[in-house]
């Protein structure tokens, strides 16, 4: 009696995976496009503030990376995940260079103002 109860299939797993994949894709696309929009808006509005500009570029690259990951999961291709890792490495290198410039500017001019970057010229 119990063996027939456990052998019944109450849901079509293939259909469930298909609809959960589409829901996953819709959620990831909306999150990725909102991150790209926030990053682009921040990069255009924080042009004088270097820290805000760097953070906006990081958010923009994170949104692009999420797009690559979600499309690679949908198409069962690992190339998007590899590109996403490369994008994140590029974002890390960009952060290191930007924070190094901020540190040097802070040591020379003792403030991190946009006008103090002229002192860094040789």
Image: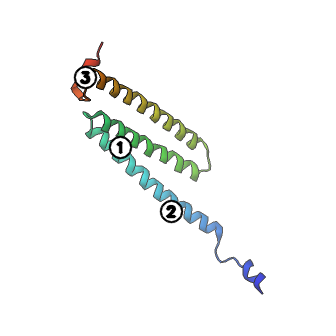
Task: Give the position of the N terminus as an image quadrant.
Answer: bottom right
Q: Which image quadrant is residue 106 in?
A: top left
The image shows residue 72 at horizontal and vertical percentages of 57, 48
**Horizontal side, residue 101 vs residue 72: left or right:** left
What kind of element bears circle 2?
Answer: helix
Disc number placed over residue 100 in the picture, else none = none
Q: Alpha-carbon neighbours of circle 2 within 10 Å: few (<14), some, or many (≥20)?
A: few
The image shows residue 64 at horizontal and vertical percentages of 45, 43
Give the alpha-carbon distance from disc 3 to disc 2, as whole Å: 52 Å
Q: Which image quadrant is residue 13 in?
A: bottom right
The image shows residue 23 at horizontal and vertical percentages of 50, 62
Disc number placed over residue 39 in the picture, else none = 1
Residue lying at 59% horizontally and 63% vertically, measured from the top left: 18
| Pick the front one: 88 or 73 | 88
- Compared with 5, 28 (above or below) is above
Residue occupied by mark 3: 109
- Compared with 88, 71 (above or below) is below
Task: Give the position of the C terminus as an image quadrant.
Answer: top left
What kind of element bears circle 3?
Answer: helix
Residue lying at 43% horizontally and 50% vertically, measured from the top left: 32
Residue occupied by mark 2: 23
Give the alpha-carbon distance from disc 1 to disc 3, as whole Å: 29 Å
Residue lying at 37% horizontally and 38% vertically, measured from the top left: 57
Q: Which image quadrant is residue 14 in?
A: bottom right
Of callouts 2 and 1, the N-terminal one: 2
Of callouts 3 and 2, the N-terminal one: 2
Disc 1 vs disc 3: Cβ atoms closer than 8 Å?
no
Front disc: 1 or 3: 3
Task: Spot the residue most to the top.
Answer: 122
Give the alpha-carbon distance from disc 2 to disc 1, as whole Å: 24 Å
- Compared with 110, 49 (above or below) is below
């Amino acid at each position: 009696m119990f063996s027939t109860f456990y052998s019944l299939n109450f849901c079509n797993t293939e259909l469930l995976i298909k609809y959960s994949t589409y829901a996953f894709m819709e959620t990831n696309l909306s999150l990725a496009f909102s991150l790209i929009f926030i990053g682009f808006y921040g990069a255009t509005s924080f042009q004088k503030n270097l820290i805000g500009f760097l953070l906006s570029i990081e958010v923009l690259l994170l949104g692009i990376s999420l797009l690559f990951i979600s499309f690679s999961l949908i198409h069962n291709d690992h190339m998007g995940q590899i590109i996403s890792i490369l994008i994140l490495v590029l974002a890390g290198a960009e952060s290191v260079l930007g924070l190094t410039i901020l540190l040097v500017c802070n040591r020379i001019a003792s403030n991190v103002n946009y006008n103090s970057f002229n002192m860094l010229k040789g």
